[in-house]
Image (cartoon, coloured by chain):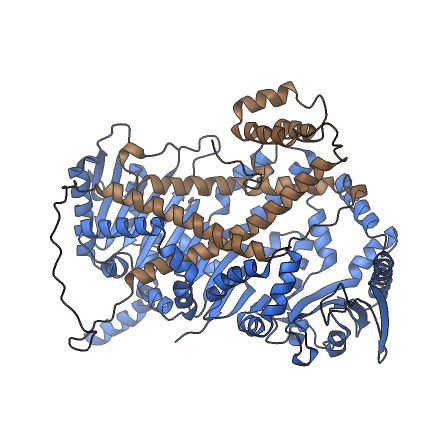
Amino acid sequence: MTSPRLFLAVAVWCAPAAAFAGPRDDLLRLVPDDYTFCLVVQNIREHAKADGQSSFLKGLAESPLVKGYQNTPEAEKLRTAFESILKDLGITPEQLRDDLLGDAVVFAYRKGPPGNEAKEDGLILVHARDGKLLARVVERVNDLQTKGGELKAVEPVAGKDGEYFRRVKSDKQQPAEFYALRGNRLVFSGSEALLQSALAKLATPGDGEPFVARRMQQLGVSDCPVSFLVNPRAFDADLADSAKTGKDAERAFLKEFAGYWKAVDGVALFLNFAPSLELGLAVHARKADLPGPARRFFAEAGKRSPLWDRVPEDALFALVGRFHAESMTAMLGSFLTEQDRRKVLDGVARMSKTFFKPDDLGPVTRGFGPDVGFWVTKPDAASHTWCPQALLAVKLADGPDGRKAELAALKGLDFLARLASLSEKDLSVFEEQQGAVPVTGLTSAGLFPPGFRPCFASKGGYLLVAGSPETIARFEPPKDPPTDAPEVTVLRISVTAWRDYMKAHRHGLVEYLAKVHHTDRAALNPQIDALLPLLDGLDQIEIVQRAGPDRVSLVLRLKDHRK
Amino acid sequence: MTDFDPTAEPDPARPGCEHGQSALLRLLDGEPGWDTPEASAHRAACADCREELALARSMVRLPEAVAVPAGLSDRIVRGAIAARRRRNLLRIAGVGAALATGILVVIWANRPRPEVPPGNGPEIVEVPAPTPEPIAATPPKPLGTSVSEARDAIVLLTKRTATEPGERIGRLVPTLTPAEDPDTSDELQPLADARIGAARSVEPIRESARRAVNFFMRAADPPDRAPQP
């Protein structure tokens, strides 16, 4: 093989590793494996461009509420202080964002052991695009603090792995700080031992993916600009200690919780800017180590319910999920002592006596779900009402348990409707037949908003409770089974639909709210006017559940119009 | 003295306050022997319980003819818990708003400004410069002080953005009072106890997170005002 070819082969072979060992991983390999928290901020330079395209952020910034905050004394103080800092350091905001902090910044914190919390330490790591600028800024900070009397001296220390510096405070009671500059990297710590350990790692070539980077990969937050990682192992001893004190019920909960906690390998809070704004919580747990009911509950909850096919795209609000009642009850019950579990079940059975006999609690629980959905839609234009239409749909299981649950629900709801009509003279019960489906409900000209006639029915294997019989008539029971999906929507709010609704029906809604709050419409209008601009530029708000290998994430997503 | 706010902290986060809180409930129920030596000793060391007692005393200064309905204190406490839950929910929503505001501050402070080409911009009228008044020379502010001021401003701004929008929304949302079933309150007590266990299970994380924030914040403080751990 000729030399150029050899170089090419080596370059191709090394390329993935070079891409892998980016600025972030370059810092993460310095984080101790027994960290407690780790905040990782990466690639802010590129992500800031995505933020600039967000119509929601633009609308939010121009809203009267945020503009109001921009004029507060706190904001003014922040602006002044920020400008003063940049002036002192001799850098521009763009240099700060792009050249100093734009690559990666990591804060790692290690808590003290239980009972000795003050024995904590931490590490601040910066990977700057411009190493010379970083060195200049560090020197400037030292200089300013020395002249300002905050620092007594900055002393060089000849360490085993190269030189680092000790920042000696003028106040003798304040401990010294330590830092080192290595190329584009700044390593800063209040603990000399931690700094030395980081420098020792820097002096040796990295051996594969850093521990924290691997954890980020498992949690699905590798590409997030901001992620806050929690190391569950740092809290094992605290949880074990907690479970030793308190009432029986508290200790039972803590003991069971500790079992679940041991199965958790990592937890992260994260923030994403593109393609949408996302704020999420990710948990990585070894499914095999979770108790059986929990595995079953999460497996069902991770599937997409066919009820989503029945939710109109422009629903004002929709909450749909799969709640396996039997495994959920077993899972929650495991957090109680046997005696308490029986006591609670007796209480629940007594509370539900309107609907079924106490002995039927088990079959009825198994008979409901797992598909459950509740959604609210704009009123029909023809209905001449401002009152939105709502529907609650609960799947009834096939077989005798489902039949038992259906009878219990219909009997109980019928009883409650008739009881309500007896206690309120303006209420009356109505019954109507929609083909083979009997619908029962309540009507009142004086008490309910126009168009609101709450009713219930059993249709195509679903128990339905709706705001009007027309909503039940429109519901077509889904026939498809639930499906596995990498991402499942749990909640969806259409902001676009809300804007249209408010344009068309604001008057009626404000009158109703004024009645409910016993206040004047004039007092509510300014409140709504102040909030509405916050929603400008936003299309949809969603909460979604994402699944991966041994991982589940719950994400709040704000969809906006991007350029 | 801090402002008393019954919704500010969940009871489980105040382990050791059981005696103080039990005494408070007895006082609200009008029991003559409401106080105990344990509760009294606890209050001597607990500012929160002292403040709550002061408030409770002001509440029970009612005319003697007014009959306090049975279980009144229970309902007050339940109402306070419901209000606290609502406010906590709004605070969580507010944190999102605070984050967004934080992002905005960075983006808007750093956004590229369009340069106005000469001749195309608005007409500029020259006004005579005002006679400069003598300004007393102020010594340059130490860097640590500026950093510390920025930090304080961020904390205050975050607190405002995390609470005010939530309170506005709260004024529009109807308050729902959960139905009560006094017959089952005893049977469901284990759930309330388990809830305390749930709160205690996340307490180490919450406390460590608080310490971690303080730990890194201390690095930004000038020596004369660095808080104690």
In the rendered structure, the colour chosen for chain A is blue
Q: Is residue A265 above or below residue A276?
A: above
Q: Image quarter for residue A15?
A: bottom left
Residue toward you, B28 or B201: B28
Does the rendering let one see residue B193? no
- Name the spot of residue B180 as percent of width and height, x first: 75, 46
In the rendering, at what x and y percent does residue A348 appear? 79, 49
Horizontal relation, residue A81 to residue A215: left or right: left
Task: From the viewer's side, name the closer residue of B187 and A528.
Answer: A528
Q: Residue at x 76, y 63 (%)?
A: A447
Please name the residue shown 27% across and 70% down the image. Answer: A11
In this view of the protein, can residue B36 be seen by the observer? yes
Q: Quadrant of residue B193?
A: top right
How far from the left and from the top, in percent, is residue A524?
A: 56, 59
Q: Number of numbered discs present?
A: 0
Q: Quadrant of the C terminus of chain A?
A: bottom left
Quarter of the picture holding the N terminus of chain A: bottom left
Residue A485: quarter of image: bottom right
Which percent across, then down, holds residue B131?
A: 11, 53
Q: Eyeballing the image, is A438 above or below A37? A: below
| Residue furthest top as drawn | B37
Chain B, chosen colour in render: brown
